[in-house]
Image (cartoon, grey):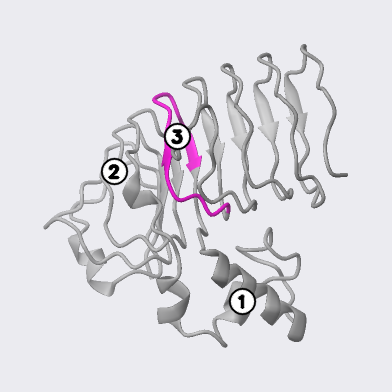
Amino acid sequence: MLSIGTLPKSLKYFDCSLNKNLTTLSELPDTLTYFDCCGTGITTLPTLPPNLEELDCSCNDLGISICNGDSDICVFPDSLKKLICNSCNFTEIKLPPNLEHFECSNHFQRETIDLFKQLNKTRDISNASGMNCIQDNFNIDEVMKYISRKQLYGERYNLISSIDLPESLKFVDCSRNNLTIFPTLPKNITYFDCSHNEIRHYSSHVYLPEGLETLNIQGNNNQFVGRLGKLPKSLTVFKYK
């Protein structure tokens, strides 16, 4: 499949995920509230409907993706509440003000992804994990044996540092994203995962909002844990080793 014809104007739910040969999307109807194009062959998002609430565009080589206008910054509709853009190679995006769920892990530059794919062709790698949407039989722990940590993390784009997190956010996963600065967390957040980054810049005490239930800071600078200060009483899951 290379393209999809005209979609019905009454359509509310559209899932075209995992169609590797899909490279072109037709105009999306304004009635659409759910759109999943994860793991396709598209390189540019179409204009997004004004009432869209959930979008998964993960595992696409979107790069600077032009949507909703002529700007190089990808702008999402204000109605969006859930955005999943793992491993999609975005360079700059603007988050909508009412977003509640945001996933942006595994932002690699193109050269690194190509290297992973090449390794996967020559080695017996199974038990897919964090990057399985880039290659079906991919295991990042196996690849780490053959690539230096400096190279692996140095070739990622630090997406999270270039955007503002809206106060409406409750769930944020920015793991494996070359994050070096601990961001200011929204006051209503309940889940935050910044594991396997390179966090080394933070204030004397990192602010953790009351109401935070899950915090994962594994795989960062060891000194980072000592800067956390007082953990919120609401915390039920804490990963830090």
In the picture, measured across the screen, residue 198 lies left or right of residue 152, that is left
In percent of the image, x 33 and y 47: which residue is there?
162
Dot in front, 1 or 3: 3
Q: Secondary structure at mark 3?
A: loop
Classify mark 2: helix, strand or loop: loop
Measured in 3D between alpha carbons, the distance from the residue under mark 2 to the one under mark 1, in whole angstroms, is: 44 Å
User: Dot 1, crowdedness within 10 Å: few (<14), some or many (≥20)?
Assistant: few
Our reading of the magenta stretch's main secondary structure is loop
Q: Would residue 8 be found to the left or right of residue 166 on screen? A: right
Closer to the observer: label 2 or label 1? 1
The amino acid sitting under disc 1 is: Leu
N-terminal-most mark, 2 or 1: 1
Residue 209: where, in percent of width, then height? 27, 40
Q: Amino acid at mark 3?
A: Ser
Q: Is residue 142 above or below residue 61?
A: below
The residue lying toward the viewer, choosing from 75 and 144, is 75
- Residue 115's disc number: 1
Disc 3 or 2, which lies upstream in sequence? 3
Percent coordinates x, y for residue 66 in the rendering: 53, 37
User: Which residue is denoted by mark 3 in the rendering?
Assistant: 71
Q: Quadrant of residue 233?
A: top left
For the record, the magenta segment spans: 88-102
Q: Are marks 1 and 3 in contact (CB under 8 Å)?
A: no
Along the viewing direction, whichever of 46 and 113 lies nearer the viewer: 46
Q: CA distance from mark 3 to mark 2?
A: 43 Å
User: For the view shown, which residue lies furthest in the left direction?
Assistant: 204
Q: Quadrant of the C terminus?
A: bottom left
Crowd around label 3: few <14 · some 14–19 · many ≥20 (10 Å): few
| Quadrant holding the N terminus | top right
**Label 2 sits on residue:** 233
